[in-house]
Image (cartoon, rainbow, N blue to C red):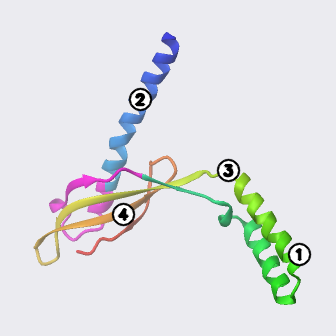
Amino acid sequence: MKRTLLILSAFLFLSGCSGGDYKKKALEYLKGNVPDPASVDSVKFIKPDSIYTTFHDTEEYRSLIKSYNNFVIDGDSVNAAKILKTVEEKEKTFKKRIVGWDVRLIYKAKTKSKVLKTDTCRFTFNANLSKVLALNGVNL
């Protein structure tokens, strides 16, 4: 029991430490993409939302859909139905995995004309929240 509590405490401590780390990385990344980095002030971080793969992201799905389309064009409804049934089964058994995180930030910063503006932007992080992959919505 004590061992379980120790492991749980360690996990909560480590996850708590990494929680602020992604925020710091996001702010640093944002400051590199605005006209006046010194004016950037975070207002609120929105809870990260997971980005995960689905069966529709796989090459197998694309191949099955191409086959389905070919059967439909050829008028072969029996094989087209089999392909759709296969796709449905694969969708049910596919194991989703997290490939990234979507983090939104409400922030204040000065525009090129030195006017303070409040805006929202979105960061795309990798699967373990250690690196910013993209930034969208910065209109200063």
Q: Secondary structure at mark 3?
A: loop
Is residue 37 one of those drawn in magenta? yes
User: In the rendering, which numbered label is found on residue 133?
Assistant: none
Could you tell me how far apart the alpha carbons at marks 2 and 1 are, in whole angstroms?
52 Å
Nearest to N terminus: mark 4 or mark 3: 3
**Relative to residue 86, is residue 27 depicted above or below?**
above
| Circles 4 and 3: CB atoms closer than 8 Å | no
Q: Inspect the image, locate mark 4, and give the three-letter code of the amino acid beneath it.
A: Arg
Nearest to N terminus: mark 3 or mark 1: 1
Near-viewer residue (112 or 59): 59
Nearest to N terminus: mark 1 or mark 4: 1
Could you tell me how far apart the alpha carbons at marks 3 and 2 are, in whole angstroms?
26 Å
Where does the magenta region start and end?
27-48
Could you tell me how far apart the alpha carbons at marks 4 and 2 are, in whole angstroms?
26 Å
**Relative to residue 140, is residue 29 depicted above or below?**
above
Which residue does the numbered mark 1 point to in the structure image? 79
Nearest to N terminus: mark 2 or mark 1: 2
| Label 4 Cα neighbours within 10 Å, binned few <14 / some 14-19 / many ≥20 | some
Q: Secondary structure at mark 4?
A: strand
Q: Secondary structure at mark 2?
A: helix
User: In the rendering, which numbered label is found on residue 12?
Assistant: 2
Q: Nearer the viewer, mark 1 or mark 4?
A: 1
The percent position of residue 46, horizontal first and vertical second, equals 32, 53
Q: Inspect the image, locate mark 3, and give the three-letter code of the amino acid beneath it.
A: Lys
| Label 2 Cα neighbours within 10 Å, binned few <14 / some 14-19 / many ≥20 | few
**Which residue is farthest top?**
2
Identify the residue shown where x is 52% and y is 50%: 127
Which residue does the numbered mark 4 point to in the structure image? 122
Q: Nearer the viewer, mark 3 or mark 2?
A: 3
Nearest to N terminus: mark 3 or mark 2: 2
Q: Nearer the viewer, mark 4 or mark 3?
A: 3
